[in-house]
Image (spheres, rainbow, N blue to C red):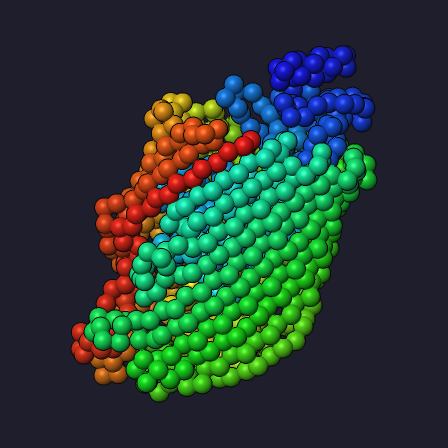
Amino acid sequence: MHLVRQAMLFSSLLFLNIQPTYVLAVTASSEHHIVRQCAVARKMPVNSTTHFAAETYYYDKAPLNGSIPVIVAVSSDLSKVGGIEAGLTTARTTNERGSVGVLGVLNTAIKVVAPVDINNNEGFERKISMRAVELSAGTFGDPSRFMQMLPGVVSDNDKFNDFIVRGGNPAETLFIVDNIEIPSINQLALSDTTGGFVSMIDNAAIQQMTLHTDAYDSKYDQRLSAVVEISTRKEGKTETHVESEVGLAGAGGSISRPWGQDGSMFISGRQSILHLLTNDIGLNGVPIYRNSLLRADKRIDERNNWWGLSLTGIDSIAIHPSPTDSFETNPYDIAYKGWRNTTGINWQHIFSNRLFGVTSLSNSEQSQSVLENAQLLRNAAIYSENTSDGITTLKYDGTLQAKPWLTLTAGVRTSLDRLNYEVEQPLGLQNPYSESAVPTDAMSFNRKFATFSSAEYSQAAALLPHGMKLVAGERLSQWAIVGSNIWTPKLLFMAPVFGMLAHVGYAEYAQLPPSLYILSFSNQETLKPIRSRHITGGLDVVDTRRARVSIEAYQKRYLDYPVAVNYPQLSLANIADTFGQAFLMFPMTSKGVGLTRGVELSLDYKPISRLILSSAVTYSRSWYSGLDGVLRRGNFDLPVVANIAGNMRAGRGLQVSFRFSGASGKPYTPDNLPLSLAQNRDVYDLTKVNGVRAEVYRRLDFRVEQSHILNKGTFTWHIGLNNALGTTNFYSNEWRPRAGDSGVLAQDQMPRFPDGGVKYSFGGH
């Protein structure tokens, strides 16, 4: 039936009295039935050499967008086909038969289809399927850990899933799920970082992820380095599907099912189990967490549909280092509890086949309590925090196909930010950047208030002759909490060069420092948004059925980065996830600068039908200054990072995957040994800030999975081994306060660690 429907569609196009050789957008599938059609464009010029004709087809079953028109364009030259489509992202895809098709993934922008090779509005984006994540070795099936394998991405510590994009900081990435901004998608995530232990979103819910790193759209709320966009909306008809699983990441399950004729629902939940197996996973404690996700979508009529979700995570951990272990480097008892929820809804209305808009309303809440006691000070409380953040966001995005060659997008966003912070650092702390043994920076504050932020943006994408494209955009953002307004432009140019797609771009972005740092001391008066200026370029060298090779280059300049007032070498850019460590709160000012540069090589290769290989190699450097203005190596300055991964279908439902990761050693600041020994603590040698580099990082991971048909369902088991060679990979040096003059002890990243689990699923897919 599928072939018959495609043949009928192709025959109807032949009736248009043109001479088609290629059909650009074949969107009819076995789940979608064409029920009516109407012409929306006559034969018209796209450029000086090409004409196209278009038809609009409506589907009677379209759970993604309702009856949204999809433009089908035809031409005798596939590289010069032109057209538009409303509400669906068009991408050049090649199926097993080698034919070109359309990805029907919901987007809030009308995409220009032609030329087919330059159909997006940004320089580089990486699309990731959840099946690739689940099969990958060394990731525990966690999306954020999979991101650490991509070009231009590194991790701070492979025990956690935070990642750094193009030399930035883990807090510089925005997460969006179904057009709803999520402050954090991870469990055990502090309010000032996007990393954590494991994702809150069930893998069964995710249909596709996209990592935006290069001149990304002006519509996204500002982040300095990257945007991760997650879609949970399944393309095509939804059938009832149930999954249950048990693994090291937890035990849980999910169910997806139709909701009437034109909707669907998904519910999932998960509970950690590690605390039932051990009392220490290398953190002097074990995290306990649970999460749930509820999402739904519904088509109201052929012009209106809505979708929404509610994501909740609850977690805690008690860290209790042994007070009698002379090798212990962390003399602090830490108790943490956290809770976070994001609930949002989107409404899409199609005004015409050239104009549609999406209204989004969401609310996010996050609260956490942290208590730290110093074992060496008779368990005196040295830090306590009871904080809650709430943000209610209303935004509207509109897209207009003004001309066959011109697409306009614009939107507005406003949010009410609610902050309730009670923080105490009563005794101050001994700072390793200070040569004085006297604890400093004691502070206490209790702030409860609401503040506003807003933004507007506009963007134009224009097709030019000879297969070229120009995208220009701007965004004006306002933050009342620091009294700042910042205008950020974007410009991107794409063109074919000797049969290869090339792009160059310039973009600026801005982002507030974390609220906890803004509200401490008098930082609200001295801090302002951090800014970054990106210059990017890239080339798709090879793009065939068997191989894809791309090269990307970038430079980012940072301005107004928060730096310590009393420690002229210290920048917030060099502070990552401090989970399990003593907090360092200090007065700051926005006078830091930074510079990152890099070149990325990405290779995907399919030598045979059963084997897929991928490789990502990045050369990059990063430097940041403190208040003294001196550029020094950043904490995440890893000149060479390489990842090689493979997956092989071995038959009988068996799949084997591997990953090898290698990187330059981490930079670190050595201790001033005479002062450290005299004061029995870490005192940094400030003449060598990040001046020493550790040994090379190496890690090899394996994973094996097999599926069996069992009682009308599918039973799947998997086992894996992370860091199979047991390589010792350096993370940091920490002082041993109970070991006399023994000095520091190297803290390592993930040791050899097993993975495993079972899953049973039944129903449709």
Quarter of the C terminus within the rendering = top right
Q: Residue at x 66, y 48 (%)?
A: 308
Instruction: Report whether 161 appears left or right of 207.
Output: left
**Quarter-of-image position of residue 478:** bottom right
Taking the view exactly as shown, the residue that stands out farthest to the front is: 711
Q: Residue at x 68, y 45 (%)?
A: 307
Say if residue 460 shows up in the picture. no
Depth check: 353 or 295 in front? 295
Depth check: 569 or 424 in front? 424
Q: Is residue 120 above or below residue 685?
A: above
Q: Residue at x 32, y 56 (%)?
A: 277
Residue 186 % position (x, y): 49, 56
Depth check: 635 or 620 in front? 635
Residue 593 % position (x, y): 49, 65
Q: How many marks?
A: 0
Say if residue 354 shows up in the picture. yes
Q: Is residue 402 above or below residue 456?
A: above
Quarter of the N terminus within the rendering = top right
**Quarter-of-image position of residue 647:** top left
Depth check: 672 or 280 in front? 280
Instruction: Report whether 632 appears left or right of 30.
Output: left
Taking the view exactly as shown, the residue that stands out farthest to the left is: 741
Residue 47 % position (x, y): 71, 27
**Quarter-of-image position of residue 644:** top left
Residue 45 % position (x, y): 75, 25
Q: Residue at x 36, y 24 (%)?
A: 652
Instruction: Report whether 544 appears left or right of 702.
Output: right
